[in-house]
Image (cartoon, grey):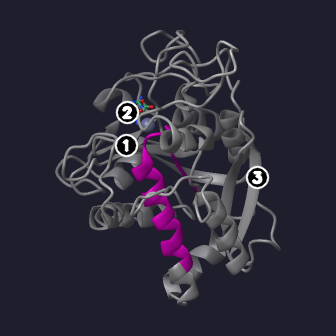
Amino acid sequence: SGFDVWRSWDEPGGIRDELYQVAKDNPQLVKLVVLGHTYQGREIIAMKLTQGARGIADGSRPAVLHSSTQHAREWISTEVNRRLMHWYIDEWRANDKETRNLLRNNELWFVLVANPDGYQYTFDHERLWRKNLRDNDGDNQITRADGVDPNRNFPEHFGYDEEGSSSQTSSDTYRGPSAASEPETQAMISLLDRGDFEFQINWHSFGQWLLYAEGWQTGTPTADDPIYYALSGNRDNPAIPDFEPGLSSDVLYVTNGETTDFAHVQRGTLAWTPELGEGDDEGGFVFPDDEAQVQAEFERVLPYSLDVAKSAADPDDPVSH
Ligand code: 0X9
Ligand code: ZN
């Protein structure tokens, strides 16, 4: 693709190829599941990491779901998630005791590109595309009028109001024709039903926030809030340095039909939307193609990610720094 860091989905040695290669190289630890297919026929792929991955049923062990790039242009989210996936594999291969223990007792699932059509489109056509590639007007070409926001299409308060999602097909937050109408949504739901997910980390960018559910309303605290507080930290001592933790609808804005709201309310999975940084030159969604800055962003979120993973075995007693 001509970048130092970024790789598309389709290119040889790209993200799709890499998932298959990693699975091939680590049969004891890694299992791939094709959750579904996009409008353009791309696979939506989940990777499971757990000791003896292929000999033990999915959902046997308490799990964490790490998802990224629901929004096509948020490349840093795939890259941070990809590095996290490799970090666990490398530590396991190096016989790190804590990681061995973690992966004997838990499943860690990764969906590096939740919206592969849109992601590929940002490499081939339009760097700032956000949505999937549903052909809303049926004219067999993709224009501004097309696409559904995958993070507004879930069957939790779907279409609750016009503030939290849009009924306009040309809007960047178009919610789609009906709840879970999109293959990307159906794929994520099927994964949530496949594993025993205590937690989901749904990586997005940008803004340096550590947001937690539920995003459709600001009013009512949930019984799970103490766990969110413990693992998110607070303004003075956030779980991710220089991120602001808080209720998503409070810190940022309200949404409806959101992934993490569905996960929390309907599947009992505590879920965060970390909004990663934008790098040194304030590129917004366009994080610099710079190895050192990308690696620094990954290292910044690693301790939080590890605390979440270590807490999956007993979420009521979260591990936190
Ligand atoms: O709008 C979104 O889907 C997320 N932000 S982004 O800039 N990556 O598109 C934020 C979702 C977090 N939830 C709420 N703010 N309710
Ligand atoms: Zn996003």
Q: Amino acid at mark 1?
A: Ser
Res 107 seen here: no
Q: Is residue 45 left or right of residue 157?
A: right
Q: Which residue is depicted at the point 67% across and 72% down?
A: 21
Secondary structure state at the residue bearing disc 3: strand
Residue 34, numbered circle? 3
Q: Which residues are magenta?
A: 65-89
Q: Amino acid at mark 2?
A: Ser
Residue behind label 2 places its C-beta within 8 angstroms of ligand 1:
yes
Q: Is residue 24 left or right of residue 297?
A: right
Question: What secondary structure do most residues of the magenta stretch adopt?
Answer: helix
Residue behind label 1 places its C-beta within 8 angstroms of ligand 1:
yes
Q: Is residue 126 magenta?
A: no
* Mark found first going from the N terminus, 2 or 3: 3
The crowding category of the residue bearing disc 1, from other C-alpha atoms within 10 Å (few below 14, some 14 to 19, many at least 20), is many
Q: Which residue is depicted at the point 20% across and 46% down?
A: 235
